[in-house]
Amino acid sequence: MLQIKNIGKNFGGVKAVDDLSFSVDKGEIVGLIGPNGSGKSTTINLICGVFPVDLGNISVDDQNISSLPTHERVASGISRTFQNIRLFKDLSVWQNIWVALQQDSDQSAGWMQEWFGNSKVQKEKIKEILVFSGLGDRFNDLAGNLSFGEQRRLELARAIASKPKLILLDEPAAGMNSDEVADLRQRILDLKKLGLTVLLVEHVMELVMNVVDRIVVLNFGKKIAEGSPENIQNNEDVQKAYLGGG
Ligand code: ADP
Ligand code: MG
């Protein structure tokens, strides 16, 4: 469903992403890993349209999205979380979801307009998303008062509120303890059960190796390996890249 073909992105002299190609099938969870600075976040930003690709193209369900603005990519079913938590800490949990939906609502499909036509329906829908995300009892609390793990859950809740078909997660386990990682793993598997397609950028191997179907490894913006978790764990090029040998 996601096809990335020969994409490239330069920042000044740095080839952040260099002739990268890979694809993700519908319903698949693919891990995108690599050392710091290897181009993982840039790849997510290119898929979301934060900036355009210099070269190559990106398509979702055979539609070339390479030159669409971000909001049209959201409307076409792409959603993301950020490497650094970006919540409105002075707003309540439900308001954080509401704001995100408002931002998307003028561009997106009719179902969202239906929500906003009726604020009671809207609140019920938000409640549903929060219950699904394990935040049902936090509906009215300030986002800033949530624990770290709960804030990450709220980010995920916000990302699924736009009813995406493809979700891009940028290091969702960063800073989590192992109980929180186990909870996150289950939540990612729940997304898969709903039929979502997931691209997971992650450093926490305990999560990556136990949740993904397939892994793509980057180093200096290039793909250096691709395969099953077992395959990647035993790959010498990958081990070298992580030891800093390039
Ligand atoms: P990763 O997420 O794998 O750690 P990034 O995609 O963030 O790596 O970064 C890849 C390279 O691109 C790094 O050298 C980084 O400094 C550079 N880079 C990323 N984003 C920008 C930007 N907006 N402007 C300039 N350089 C950037
Ligand atoms: Mg990054």
Image: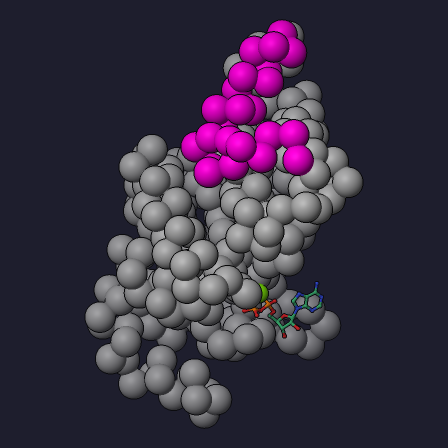
Tell which of 26 and 93 is nearer to you: 93
Residue 152 rendering spot, x and y as whole percentages: 55, 50
Q: Main secondary structure of the magenta part?
A: helix
Residue 243 rendering spot, x and y as whole percentages: 43, 89
Q: 19 above or below 129? A: below
Q: How is the image coloured?
A: one colour
Residue 213 rendering spot, x and y as whole percentages: 27, 55
- Which of the four quarters of the rendered structure image does ligand 1 lie in? bottom right
Q: Is residue 137 magenta?
A: yes
Q: What residue is shown at x 52% (from left), y 45% (from top)?
A: 153
Q: How many dots with numbers?
A: 0
Does residue 24 appear in the picture of this structure? Answer: no
Does residue 51 appear in the picture of this structure? Answer: yes
Whether residue 191 sits left or right of residue 92 in the image: it is left
Whether residue 116 sits left or right of residue 24 in the image: it is right
Q: 123 above or below 39? A: above
User: What's the magenta region?
Assistant: 118-141
Q: What residue is shown at x 70% (from left), y 38% (from top)?
A: 142
Tell which of 69 and 215 is nearer to you: 215
Q: Is residue 96 magenta?
A: no
